[in-house]
Amino acid sequence: MSDDMQPIKGRPGPTPIPAIDRLMRRVTADAVTGCWLTTYKPMSAGYVLVGVADQGKVLGHRLTYEHYRGPIPEGLELDHLCRNRACVSPLHLEAVTRRVNMARGDHPSAITKRTNICRRGHSMADALVESRGRRCRTCRRESNRRWRDRT
């Protein structure tokens, strides 16, 4: 390539701001809960995404955890102890197995497992163990009765 065909070098652009700094500029601490909430709009699942130069988009709570507490151990995932998915406070996060994270959740099966009461209020003490998991014996009987009595 001849000298006159060399690409023109422009002025360098501004120095990129690290993702953690961009995130922390938009964090405010909730005085009541202690959650670190951002002005980033959460996704439909409630989590916050932050753009990282070499990784694309990263979940905000993972970014803060790894920055302040270190890497997430292999085979573990982060559990929001505050139950607020938009919170990015590393103090509100714990690295746990998927099973523990699911058991701590707010969905009906996790609540049933913790309380040993089905979603309709029956005791799970004599629950049936089926291929789909534990089922409330009373609810199962009622379901079978409705199925038999259908016209």
Image (cartoon, rainbow, N blue to C red):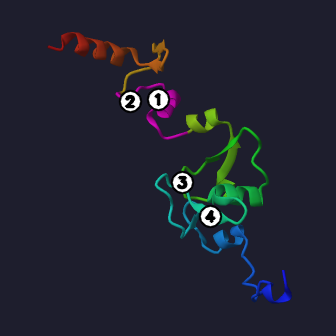
Q: CA distance from mark 3 to mark 4?
A: 17 Å
Whole-percent x, y for residue 144 in the image: 29, 12
**Which labelled disc corresponds to residue 112?**
1
Decide: marks 4, 2 in contact (CB < 8 A)?
Answer: no
Residue 83's mark? none
Is residue 15 or residue 19 the one in the foreground?
15
Q: Residues within 10 Å of mark 2 (few under 14, many from 20)?
A: few
Q: Secondary structure at mark 4?
A: strand
For the residues bearing labels 4 and 1, Cβ distance under 8 angstroms = no
Q: Extreme left residue here?
A: 151
Q: Is residue 47 visible?
A: yes
**What residue is rendered at 45% in x and 15% in y?**
127
Q: CA distance from mark 1 to mark 3?
A: 21 Å
Please state, as top left, top right, bottom left or bottom right, where the C terminus lies in the image.
top left
- Nearer-N-terminus badge (3/4): 4
Which numbered dot is residue 50? 4
Quarter of the rendering containing residue 10: bottom right
- The N terminus lies in quadrant: bottom right
Residue identifier under label 3: 84
